[in-house]
Image (cartoon, rainbow, N blue to C red):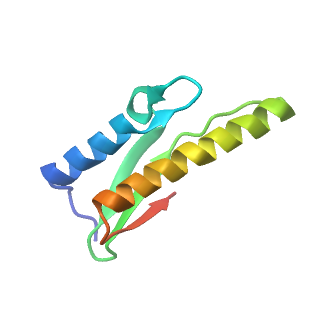
Amino acid sequence: MEKTMDPEMIRKIDNVLGSVKEPESNLSVAELGIIQKFRYNEARRALYIFANTYSSRKACCYLITKLIESDVMNRVKNELKKEFPELTIRFV
């Protein structure tokens, strides 16, 4: 059963999205719009993250982009784990 997030949870998520920066542009995840939405499932104690991924057709750019993307997503996940240690954090 999904539950609406309380304002404090939303504030913490917004803070994480505002603080994690993409290294190439130095813009925050919030500014880049990388995260599409979140879903909170109280019964499973889980926070699901729906992300937009970068796309590039060139092999060299694709590899670099995926490395940067992976790093940014890991930092988002780690920061969310700090804010919500009791929850499972998952990218969907």
Residue 53's quadrant in the figure? Answer: top right
As drawn, which residue projects farthest toward the right? 59
Task: Give the side of residue 7 with respect to residue 32, left or right.
Answer: left
Classify 69 as above or below 23: below
Task: Give the side of residue 22 with respect to residue 61, left or right.
Answer: left
At a point 44% along the width and 41% down the height, the residue shown is 35
Looking at the image, which is closer to me, 92 or 28?
28
* Residue 20 shows in the view: yes
Picture coordinates of residue 45, whole percent (x, y): 31, 73
Q: Which part of the image, by quadrant, shows the N terminus?
A: bottom left
As drawn, which residue projects farthest toward the bottom? 43
Picture coordinates of residue 83, whole percent (x, y): 29, 58
Picture coordinates of residue 74, whole percent (x, y): 53, 52
Picture coordinates of residue 41, whole percent (x, y): 31, 67
At a point 43% along the width and 41% down the height, the residue shown is 36
Classify 88 as above or below 62: below
As drawn, which residue projects farthest toward the left? 7
At a point 64% along the width and 39% down the height, the residue shown is 68
* Residue 49 shows in the view: no
| Tally of marks | 0
Classify 27 as above or below 13: above
Residue 28's quadrant in the figure? Answer: top left
